Image (tube, helix red, strand yellow):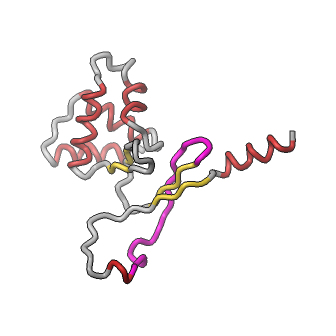
Amino acid sequence: MKKMQDRLLNDLKGKNIRLSHQRLKVVEYLCQNHIHPTVDQIYLSLKNSIPTLSKTTVYNILKTLVEAGLVKVITIDNNESRYDINTQMHGHLKCEKCGRIFDFNIQFISFSNDELKNFEISEKNVYFTGVCPKCIENTSQDYRS
């Protein structure tokens, strides 16, 4: 976790992005909370420790991080943008019960579709929805009670 944070901070410096206290705190939050947070989640988690923080500032910091290629925006539900510190190619599954988003590895290189052979692909995303093992377990316990 500390390694990732150090790498991100070095990348920010390398791209001449000023390391303000608020930016550092957002980066730290993302590195410590691999939950694919929304702007609201980040803002609510940091507002007590940074009283001058606004939601607009969080949006702007995330926009800067996305433009720098250090964070990815994922949109599984049409009305909700979430932020992923893991910029490597991978898929996501959103649990329909608890709302958590899980990462999973997928071999994008071997994934092909003849119907898209004349297209230029700029981004690949794989999103699944389903029920996570913990929610399945909780549901089966409810039936046993």
* Quadrant that contains the N terminus: top left
Name the residue rendered at 40%, 79% in the picture: 113
Q: In the rendered view, would you say 3 is above or below 58?
A: below
Secondary structure that dominates the magenta span: loop
Q: 26 or 127: which is nearer to us? A: 127
Name the residue rendered at 38%, 75% in the picture: 109
Q: Residue 35 at what x, y percent from top left?
A: 47, 42
Report whether 106 appears left or right of 116: right
Q: Residue 131 at what x, y percent from top left?
A: 63, 51
Q: In the rendered view, would you say 3 is above or below 44?
A: below
Name the residue rendered at 15%, 48% in the picture: 15
Quadrant hosting residue 65: top left
Name the residue rendered at 40%, 47% in the picture: 78
Q: 18 or 73: which is nearer to us? A: 73
Q: Is residue 110 magenta?
A: yes
**Which residue is outermost to the right?**
145
Report whether 7 appears left or right of 127: left
Q: 115 or 30: which is nearer to us? A: 115
Q: How many marks?
A: 0
Q: Residue 71 at what x, y percent from top left?
A: 31, 48
* Quadrant that contains the C terminus: top right
Q: Is residue 128 magenta?
A: no
Report whether 39 appears left or right of 64: right
Q: Residue 144 at what x, y percent from top left?
A: 86, 43
* Residue range of the region highlighted in magenta in the rendering: 96-113
Q: In the rendered view, would you say 59 is above or below 103?
A: above
**Which residue is outermost to the left?**
16
Q: 131 or 6: which is nearer to us? A: 131
Report whether 77 appears left or right of 120: right
